[in-house]
Structure formats: structure tokens, C-alpha cells
Image: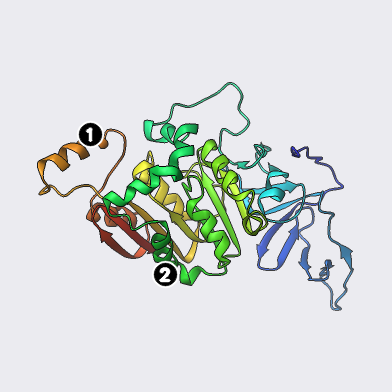
Amino acid sequence: MATSTFSLNHHHRYLIPRQHGVSWNSRNCVPKRFFASGLTSRIKASSAVAVEPELRPPAQDATEAELFACPICYEPLMRKGPSGFNVPAIYRSGFKCRKCDKSFSSKNIYLDLTVTSGTKEYSESKPTRTELFRSPVVSFLYERGWRQAFSRSGFPGPDEEFKMAQEYFKVAEGGVLVDVSCGSGLFSRKFAKCGAYSRVVALDFSENMLRQCYDFIQNDESIISSNLALVRADVSRLPFFSGSIDAVHAGAALHCWPSPSNAIAEINRILRSGGVFVGTTFLRVNPSAPTIFRALEQSATRTYSYFTQEEIEDLVTTCGLVNYTSKVQGSFIMFSAQKR
């Protein structure tokens, strides 16, 4: 695994994209357009068109990361390492913020893009529901009995949930999909394997969930070589540019987030116009439900945050998303909304 060591001198050019297909030299603001041949042309301001062929930088040079942004300032990350967008290429690369000079590296299998990445003596206390899923035991059991038990609450099962989500995501096909709070990658793997998206990011705050995801994909060549990246990040501080993502999926996640409102506001920020957000969660039992169910729910809400259908719709629309729709089965709800 390569760690990031960046040489910040005049030999490296750092390019900041301004529009599709165009990059800009940060030193003299000369626009440069990339061609499929691997050459670039420099456009000079004159009455005649002058073209100077240049070779692209070698793969090991520090170049601009094509998707990821700094979780502190949301500025572009510079990447040094092998080219390509897949699990091996991403975790062998080092990343550095061009503005705040913070470095981000991989942890053997995933890229750590949390604000606290790289800290050695500082740690934060997280809510119980967050820490629970960082446990290696829970991470191991998640697809080995834990997730299957959701059927008792009306969840139709991963295959059916995937089909339902794909219906909402039709308008995002060919784009970038981020599976936030992906857990062990149950749905990330399905999204990557179906081939409907140019890139899929499996994102979770739990290190052990991401390790479990890697354990599931490492022997599947169709996934390990696909356009999939494993990223550790906070759903309330997503490491992407504003308006850069086509689709966001959050399976059985809303009730686990420390601040659902902050998370959905972040999702709204990173979605492009027309981008789609699809989520599933457990509904809070209706007040008219039998006493025993209300008692069980009251005990569970000490750990998780459950909402009614109306509360979820109000939250999503208040955070700026539109075209809200939902499907309910028992305590299961799948909801969807779009960026304006």
C-alpha cells in the first residue's frame, strides 16, 4: 500500500476543473482541453489558433482527484498513486487537500476521508447507535442473520429492495451513485455489479463494516475490478463537491444517524439538480398500536431514532428535496426525493 508523499514544487501542475472537458492551470489560468489520445492542447489568446501538444502527467504524479473533496473545506483533493477508479487503485493512492494541506490515506482497504483522519491522540465519543456498528462482532453478523431479521418488520428482503430502489434510480443511470451508511456493502455490491452506474462509492463510518465489505468482494473479480471505491466518511460531512453526485442510497440507515437533518441536508448539497435520494428505515409504531408494541418501541428508541411517515416527509422536504414519494409495508418504508 502506498502512502501519500507529495512534492509541492514547480514541477507539478495542479488542475482545477471549471467546466466539462476543460481544466485550468492554476499558475497562469490558461485553459487546457484533454483529448482521448492522451494529449492536451493549450489555447492561446491570439487571432490565430495555436496548438501545442503536451503529454498527460504520468500516473504516479500528483493529479487532481476526479470525485473526492476535502471533508473540511470541500476543496479538490490531489491524488498520487495508480490511476483508475476501483478498490485496489484507490486504496493504493494518497490524497491531499490543495487548500488546507491535510493528507488522507488508505487503511489497507478503504480510503479514510473523515475530518479526524490521521489523528493519533484525539478521539470523539459517538452515540451508542454509531458505536454499535463499529463493533467487529456486529459487522460480522450483519449479513449473517442481523439483516435477515428485518423481514419481521416488513422489509421485503435485499433483492426486492434493490429492485425497488433501481426503479427510482432509472434517471441516474450512467452517473455516480453513493451508498451512504453502506454497512457491509450489501447494496453497494449489487449497485456495482449491475453495471448501471459509472462509479459507485460504498461509504460508511464503521471501519469494521468496510472491512467486511472488502471480505465479501475480494474474491469476486467482477466487483473488485469494477468502478467501486470503499470510503470511510461521516454522513454529516460528505467528502464530495456540491452538485457532483447523481444518486444517493441509504438502506436501513436514517434511524441510526446522530442527526438525520444534518445528514439529509448534506445529501441535498452533494446531489446534482435532478439527482435522486432513496432511503429505507423503520417507521415508528402508530399511537393506536397495541400496548406491547408501543412498549417495545419505547425501549428501542433509547438507541435509535424512529419517525412516522409524516415526519420523514417533512424532514426530507424541509431540507430542500422535492418530488417526495414513499412505499410502506408494515414498519418498513422506502422513500425517495429529488434535488431541485
Q: Residue furthest bottom?
A: 48
Q: What numbered label is drawn on residue 272? A: none
As helix, strand or loop, the secondary structure at mark 2 comes to: helix
For the C terminus, the image quarter is: bottom left
Labelled pair 1, 2 in contact (Cβ < 8 Å): no
Q: Is residue 340 visible?
A: no
- The image position of residue 54, as x and y in percent, is 88, 64
- Give whichever of 171, 299 is nearer the camera: 299
Q: Which residue is tagged 1?
A: 299
Q: Is residue 264 above or below residue 160?
A: above
Between the C-alphas of marks 1 and 2, the distance is 35 Å
> Looking at the picture, which amino acid does disc 2 mark?
Glu
Q: Residues within 10 Å of mark 1 (few under 14, many from 20)?
A: few
Q: Residues within 10 Å of mark 2 (few under 14, many from 20)?
A: few
Picture quadrant of residue 30: bottom right
For the N terminus, the image quarter is: top right
- Give whichever of 232, 193 is nearer the camera: 193
Q: Which residue is tagged 2?
A: 167
